[in-house]
């Protein structure tokens, strides 16, 4: 998923600010997740599985330095074979996010987890896109998904939302000195308007409810007990 302007943005003060929060937040979550197979979909420029201890960790995308080169709408993994999927800013910059989510649900094992990061439309970052002088490159050219909408999509696929975390409350300044001046917003935002962080991390678990076979209520007819008969003793002659 080649996104124009992504590489330049990642090296900018704004990009480093966002990715520092996402890397630290994801590291704290994946450190305690175990299994056999983990994949990161998209953003091969960053190793978001570095702190995870799953033996086989792979990056999949349709461009860049990846382990698995593929279309994210048709993942080349067997059904129920992946324990953990990390998706950094994939859904909001892809033309078919629903199909990607369906593929993630297919390849995850029961009780497998998916971590999704995205830009929050209900934030200063989201409002920036509505201004007349908003640039047309990354990250302002995406279709931002609210946490509420994303939860609805996941629940329809049978996922249970574990938790959502917001971060990056400073305005989307382009200069590092201004980002540092607004650093006090991190504590204030997390306390007073936690839902308005510039980016979010959503964690969900694939639930597969057990099936129970319900049989018809057939009544079994018991055979009547045979009455005991008295056996007379034979006389010994």
Image (cartoon, rainbow, N blue to C red):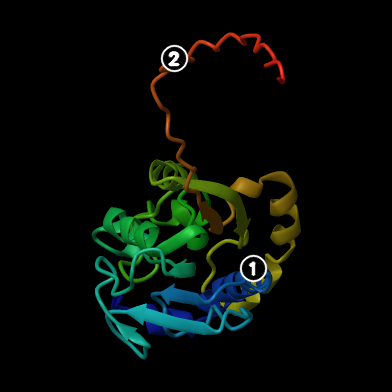
Can you tell which mark lies on residue 25?
1
Is residue 31 rendered to the left or right of residue 215?
right
Could you say which is closer to the camera, residue 157 or residue 174? 157
Which of marks 1 and 2 precedes in the sequence? 1
Residue bearing mark 2: 219
Q: Quadrant of the N terminus?
A: bottom left
* x and y percentages locating residue 110 in the rendered image: 48, 56
Q: Secondary structure at mark 1?
A: helix
Instruction: Give the number of marks.
Output: 2
Please tell me how crowded label 2 is: few (under 14), some (14-19), or many (20+) other residues with Cα within 10 Å. few
Extreme bottom residue here?
65
In front: mark 2 or mark 1?
Answer: 2
Q: Relative to 107, say whether 208 is above or below.
A: above
Could you say which is closer to the camera, residue 111 or residue 173? 111
Which residue occupies 42% across, 83% down?
44
Examine the image and state in which quarter residue 43 appears. Answer: bottom left
Real-space Cα distance between discs 2 and 1?
A: 59 Å
Examine the image and state in which quarter residue 95 appears. Answer: bottom left
Q: Relative to 171, say whether 151 is above or below.
A: above
Extreme front residue here?
237
């Amino acid at each position: 998923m080649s996104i124009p302007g992504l590489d330049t943005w990642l090296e900018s003060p704004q990009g480093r600010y966002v990715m520092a929060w996402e890397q630290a937040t994801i590291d704290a979550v994946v450190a305690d997740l175990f299994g056999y197979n983990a994949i990161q979909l998209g953003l091969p420029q960053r190793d978001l599985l570095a702190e995870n201890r799953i033996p086989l960790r792979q990056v999949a995308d349709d461009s860049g330095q990846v382990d698995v080169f593929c279309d994210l709408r048709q993942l080349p993994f067997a059904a129920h074979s992946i324990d953990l999927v990390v998706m950094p800013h994939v859904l909001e910059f892809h033309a078919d996010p629903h199909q990607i989510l369906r593929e993630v649900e297919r390849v995850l094992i029961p009780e497998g987890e998916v971590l999704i990061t995205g830009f929050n439309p209900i934030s200063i970052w989201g409002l920036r896109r509505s201004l007349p002088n908003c640039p047309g490159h990354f990250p302002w050219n995406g279709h931002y998904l609210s946490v509420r909408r994303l939860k609805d999509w996941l629940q329809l696929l049978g996922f249970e939302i574990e938790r959502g975390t917001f971060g990056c409350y400073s305005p989307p300044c382009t200069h590092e000195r201004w980002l540092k001046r607004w650093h006090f917003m991190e504590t204030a935002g997390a306390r007073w308007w936690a839902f308005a962080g510039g980016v979010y991390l959503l964690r969900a678990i694939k639930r597969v409810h057990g099936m129970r076979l319900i049989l018809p209520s057939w009544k079994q007819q018991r055979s009547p007990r045979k009455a005991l008969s008295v056996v007379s003793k034979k006389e010994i002659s």
